[in-house]
Amino acid sequence: MVSIIMGLKGSGKTKELVGLVCKAVVEGTGDVVVIEKERKLTYDIPYQARLIDAGSYGIGSYELLKGFISGIHAGNYDITHFFVDNFYGLVNNREEAALVDFIAWLDAFAEREKIDFVISMSSDREKCPEAIKKYLR
């Protein structure tokens, strides 16, 4: 399952994401991974969740993010939840078609591997592509 927390800067996206991470750690039966661009959440999320500073890997594109997520999963099949904070801080392509393609890939990956993905992104909900609206929280 893929869920997207979308809103403009300052709308509480990260706070909502942190709450979901805490819930997944307490209620979940597998491993929880949190990907962010910088280590801003170090003291906000429980230590049981694996926090990854993806900014130090220079991801930048959707293809590299796909490989990054796939590689993390290949190293640990016990992951049940992935959280990605500040999505557009990791990828620099804001083209609608590229986002739609990535989310479709992520949804198929999530379904196949039985993983829940939650992504926060700074963007106007009113201008969200139609194909993405079904993933909004």
Image: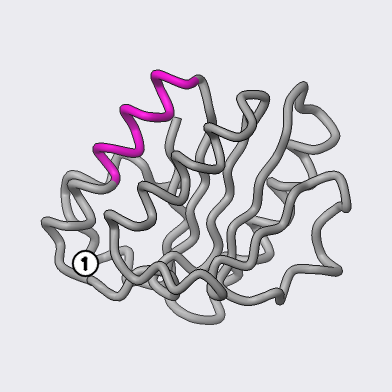
Q: Position of residue 73 (x, y in %)?
A: 54, 35
Q: Where is residue 2 in the image (x, y as percent from the top left)?
A: 43, 37
In this picture the colour scheme is one colour
Front position in the image: 63 or 102: 63
The residue under the point 86% across, 52% down is 46
Horizontally, residue 132 falls left or right of residue 7, namely left
Q: Is-magenta flag for residue 97?
A: no
- Amino acid on which the number 1 mark rests in the picture: Lys
Magenta stretch in the rendered image? 103-113
Question: In this rendering, is residue 32 above or below 56?
Answer: above
User: Which residue corresponds to mark 1?
Assistant: 127
The residue under the point 22% across, 71% down is 94
Q: Position of residue 1 (x, y in %)?
A: 45, 29
Front position in the image: 132 or 58: 58
The residue under the point 38% across, 47% down is 67
The residue under the point 21% across, 67% down is 127
Horizontally, residue 45 falls left or right of residue 12, namely right
By secondary structure, the bulk of the magenta-drawn segment is best described as helix
Horizontally, residue 95 falls left or right of residue 13, namely left
Question: In this rendering, is residue 99 above or below 23?
Answer: below
Front position in the image: 96 or 130: 96
